[in-house]
Amino acid sequence: MLLEVLTPERKLYAGEVYGVQLPGIDGSFEILDKHAPLIAALGNGKMKVLKDKNHSEFYTITGGFVEVLRNKATVLVEGAVAVEKK
């Protein structure tokens, strides 16, 4: 599926992914390929971009929304910072 992560300042991420894990306001949830249409509010926390089944990237995000439509997930957040892998 296609994932776009946008902040008010810039496009943080755009590309094909296996899925994404997000911090919802009522708890974390995951969106995978061919997910049903969805709009959800996001809280503060960690976003995990699943590039494929073995590789992922992490970001710390502050509030926003996610929309899933026609196998594209658009994540709109107030702020996001990439987390260094350890």
Image (tube, rainbow, N blue to C red):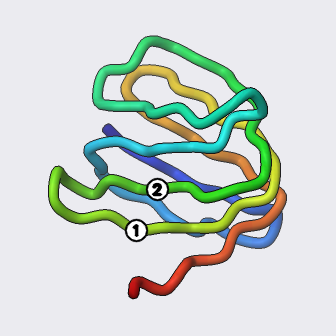
The N terminus appears in which quarter of the rendering?
top left
Pointers 2 and 1 in contact (CB under 8 A)? yes
- At which x and y percent is residue 11? 62, 66
Is residue 57 depicted above or below 70 in this figure?
Answer: below
- At which x and y percent is residue 36? 43, 12
Callout 2: SS: strand
Label 2 vs 1, first from the N-terminus: 2
- At which x and y percent is residue 80? 70, 68
Residue most extreme to the top: 36
Residue at x 71%, y 61% (from the top left corner):
61
Q: Would residue 50 appear left or right of 67 to someone viewing this image?
A: left
As measured in the structure, the alpha-carbon distance from the residue carrying label 2 to the one carrying label 1 is 6 Å
The C terminus appears in which quarter of the rendering?
bottom left
Look at label 2 and name its amino acid: Lys
Local crowd size for mark 2, using a 10 Å CA cut-off: few (<14), some (14–19), many (≥20): some
Q: Nearer the viewer, residue 48 or 16?
A: 48
Local crowd size for mark 1, using a 10 Å CA cut-off: few (<14), some (14–19), many (≥20): some
| Residue where numbered disc 1 is placed | 57
Look at label 1 and name its amino acid: Glu
